[in-house]
Amino acid sequence: MAFLEAQKLVKEYNRRGKTFRAVDDIDFTIEPGDFVMIEGESGSGKTTFLNLLTGLTDPTSGAVIIDGRSLKETGDKEISKIRNQKIKYIPQGESLLSALTVRENILFPFTIGGLERPSEERLLEVSDKLGITDLLDEYPSDLSGGEMRRATIARAVINKPSLIIADEPTGSLDSANTFKVMEIFRDIASEGTAVIVVTHQKETLGYATRVLEMDQGSLKEVV
């Protein structure tokens, strides 16, 4: 059974008096264990599509169904709960809280959600794979852009959520760390988490079980 499904998804915007579709009539499903990568030029609608899937943007028409529930029939509070417990979204840019250490940032979703924290063993396992174990007690202001990105990824993957959605997660990383991140996503997918990654880095596409291309708001399988 698909964990997430998009049905005839459309998002329209008005620009200079004209209507255009950033997302154009997309049908999409992802099941537990799938690792889907989406490529496409800037402005093709990839980020808008991800925002629709996570409920951060409302569609003009169509529906997003997560774990059997339609987002348009779900209240904001419940959507936030679903995002905190089942979905981890890694947006472009940095999202660490400056007043918290790396450790506190990684564990923050569990603090505010009242959820059971991952074990120290799991924290160290993920931190070691991402090369940030020695940074756990540092603050974001003391980190490079790539280190902050790896800490953000650690926060997303640590509790093995049902779905990870990542928008250009490795854009600020060197090749070695890019492949480390892709290996983590692949390993998590093999354990049953569904993974969606938007990327411009064609050298990473081989990690995916499916590759899709976004072009002018439309999504298609890459042969």
Image (tube, grey):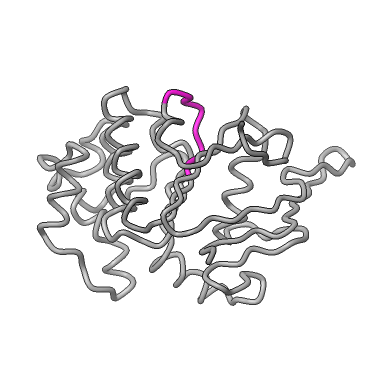
Kindly identify the residue that appears in the image at 69 percent across and 64 percent down: 63
The residue at 44%/50% (across/down) is 195
164 in magenta: no
- Residue beneath the point at 57% across and 49% down: 50
| Position of residue 176 measured from the top left corner of the image (x, y, whole percent) | 26, 25
* Closer to the camera in the image, 60 or 144: 60
Q: Is residue 31 left or right of residue 125?
A: right
Q: Position of residue 79 (x, y in %)?
A: 52, 70
Image point (48%, 47%), residue name: 196
Work out which quarter of the rendered image holds the C terminus and state it.
Answer: top right
Q: Quadrant of residue 174?
A: top left
Q: Up-down: is 83 above or below 13?
A: below
Say which of 205 and 63 sits in front: 205
| Count of picture labels | 0
Would you say 100 lies left or right of 196 here? Answer: left
Position of 77 relative to 219 (above/below): below
Q: Position of residue 36 (x, y in %)?
A: 50, 44
| Residue 39 figure quarter | top right
Residue 150: x %, y % from top left: 28, 39
Q: Is residue 177 above or below residue 129?
A: above
Report the residue that reaches farthest toward the front. 223
Task: Give the extent of the magenta segment.
Answer: 197-203
Rendering quarter of residue 111? bottom left
